[in-house]
Image (spheres, rainbow, N blue to C red):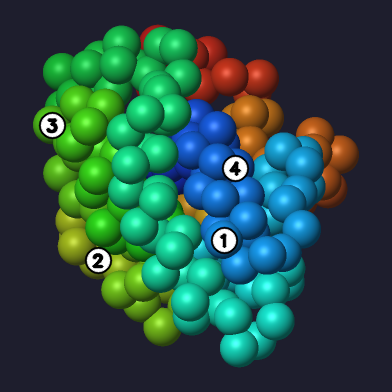
């Protein structure tokens, strides 16, 4: 088995709990556009494909662009107030960094908000590279985001591990030929995750302390 050199992390639902911020910004947007607000559970299930895909099913086509402007303006503030790091993440990333692993982020969240989150939560110092779907032709579950990160570090797919929380993460990892670990703290159910047969399913990301 090839030695692991690179570990790639998803953000939302994997190492960061930004759901309260997303729910707040979503319902603020709906209220401003006189649309029905949704339950936390409904919004949570819709997360993972980027903010346009999050809003579009609940708005008229003519409202989507305006909705994105409202959502993003509000979200810049809600992220700072309501997001937090899952327990054990700082210890995990610190350990991996100290042991010499290259660390990267692969997120469908837009780059602007990913960087806001990483800086605000003091996670940016741990990562060597951040790549988000708005810089690509296709986000996850397409494997392009993972393949580009592999190329960036000149690492073979057998030398990398991808850690995510959703069905689309498991699918992207499989399509890129990367060993994938899914953390059951995101918006996909355990049954949905099991159906994708990732290499490993864990209850929380802190379980990876000492794993590598």
Q: Mark 4 points at which residue?
A: 23
- Measured in 3D between alpha carbons, the distance from the residue under mark 1 to the one under mark 2, in whole angstroms, is 43 Å
Relative to 47, is 17 on the left or the right? left
The image shows residue 212 at horizontal and vertical percentages of 39, 22
Q: Earlier in the sequence, mark 1 or mark 4?
A: 4
Q: How dense is the environment of label 4, judged by Cα within 10 Å: few (below 14), some, or many (20 and up)?
A: many
- Measured in 3D between alpha carbons, the distance from the residue under mark 3 to the one under mark 4, in whole angstroms, is 27 Å
Q: Which of marks 3 and 1 is nearer the N terminus?
A: 1
Q: Are marks 1 and 4 in contact (CB under 8 Å)?
A: no
Residue at position x 57%, y 61% from top? 32
Q: Which of marks 3 and 4 is nearer the N terminus?
A: 4
**Disc nearest the viewer among 3 and 2:** 3
**Disc nearest the viewer among 1 and 2:** 1
Q: Name the residue under label 1.
A: 32
Does dot 2 land on a helix, a strand or a loop?
Answer: helix
Q: Are marks 2 and 4 in contact (CB under 8 Å)?
A: no
The image shows residue 132 at horizontal and vertical percentages of 34, 61
Q: Nearer the viewer, residue 132 or 202?
A: 132
- Label number found at residue 125: 3
Relative to 194, is 177 on the left or the right? left
Q: How dense is the environment of label 2, judged by Cα within 10 Å: few (below 14), some, or many (20 and up)?
A: few
Q: Mark 2 points at which residue?
A: 151
Q: Is residue 76 above or below residue 62?
A: above
Q: How dense is the environment of label 3, judged by Cα within 10 Å: few (below 14), some, or many (20 and up)?
A: few
- Measured in 3D between alpha carbons, the distance from the residue under mark 2 to the one under mark 4, in whole angstroms, is 35 Å
- Measured in 3D between alpha carbons, the distance from the residue under mark 1 to the one under mark 4, in whole angstroms, is 14 Å
Q: How dense is the environment of label 1, judged by Cα within 10 Å: few (below 14), some, or many (20 and up)?
A: few
Q: Are marks 3 and 4 in contact (CB under 8 Å)?
A: no
Does dot 3 land on a helix, a strand or a loop?
Answer: helix
């Amino acid at each position: 088995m090839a030695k692991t050199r690179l570990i790639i992390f998803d953000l939302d639902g994997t190492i960061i709990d930004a759901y309260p911020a997303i729910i707040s910004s979503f319902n603020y947007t709906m209220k401003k556009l006189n649309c029905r607000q949704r339950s936390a559970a409904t919004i949570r299930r819709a997360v993972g494909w980027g903010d346009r895909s999050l809003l579009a099913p609940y708005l008229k086509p003519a409202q989507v662009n305006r909705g994105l402007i409202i959502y993003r303006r509000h979200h810049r503030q809600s992220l700072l107030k309501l997001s937090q790091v899952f327990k054990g993440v700082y210890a995990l990333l610190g350990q991996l960094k100290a042991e010499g692993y290259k660390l990267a982020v692969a997120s469908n969240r837009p780059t602007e908000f990913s960087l806001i989150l990483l800086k605000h939560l003091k996670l940016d110092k741990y990562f060597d590279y951040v790549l988000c779907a708005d810089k690509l032709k296709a986000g996850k579950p397409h494997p392009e985001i993972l393949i580009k990160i592999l190329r960036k570090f000149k690492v073979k797919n057998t030398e990398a591990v991808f850690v995510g929380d959703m069905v689309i993460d498991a699918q992207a990892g499989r399509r890129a030929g990367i060993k994938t670990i899914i953390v059951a703290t995101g918006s996909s159910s355990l049954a949905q995750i099991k159906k994708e047969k990732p290499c490993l399913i864990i209850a929380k990301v802190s379980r990876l302390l000492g794993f590598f």
